[in-house]
Image (cartoon, rainbow, N blue to C red):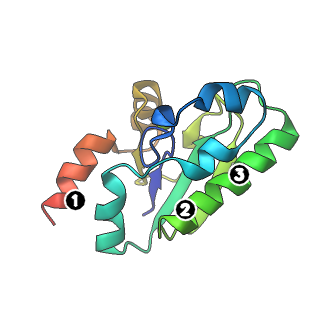
Amino acid sequence: MEIFLDMDGTIADLYHVPGWLEKILAENPIPYATADPLPLVSELVRLRFNNLGIITWGSKGSTEEFLVKTKIAKIKWLEENFLRVNKVHCVHYGTPKFLFAEPGDILIDDEEANRKAWQDHIGPAYTPEEFTEILRGL
Ligand SMILES: [Mg+2]
């Protein structure tokens, strides 16, 4: 059983990086690497899970080349925030996340549509706030 994490808005506070959208539209991946960690990260690091994975999207309309830069920036972010994961699926915006999972895997994602599709195809899905609360009790 894998726990799959979304990144933007779930573990990485991308949307509060000043100028993040303009930079990303200009194919500058730095906001992905420099976003602050959200509260879920300290719980995940504390509990040292060995079954974490990432399923994250590139930007809307991203080129293949920028998607590669995005993945590199996101892997850097994971290293700098001490989050050890087994798999990083960094895929084009809108790709269904359940394509990368097996029945029983868990998704943590701030987007309701992703959670709903996951629940229909795979199994449990939680908001980052819900999962942070669950982990705080462990
Ligand atoms: Mg998200």
Which of the two labelled residues, at mark 3 and mark 1, occupies the earlier sequence position?
Answer: 3
Residue at image point 54% right, 41% down: 98
> Could you say which is closer to the camera, residue 93 or residue 21?
21
Q: Which quadrant: the N terminus?
A: bottom left
Q: Position of residue 99 (x, y in %)?
A: 61, 43
Q: Is mark 1 within 8 Å of ligand 1?
A: no
Mark 2 sits on what residue?
78
Q: Which mark is residue 69?
A: none
Q: Earlier in the sequence, mark 2 or mark 1?
A: 2
Image vertical order of residue 26 relative to residue 130, above or below: above
Q: Amino acid at mark 3?
A: Lys
Q: What residue would you read off at disc 3?
A: 71
User: 90 and 34: which one is in front?
Assistant: 34
Cα gap from disc 3 to disc 1, whole angstroms? 27 Å
* Residue 127 image offset from top left, x and y in percent: 32, 39
Percent from the top left, x then y, of residue 108?
39, 45
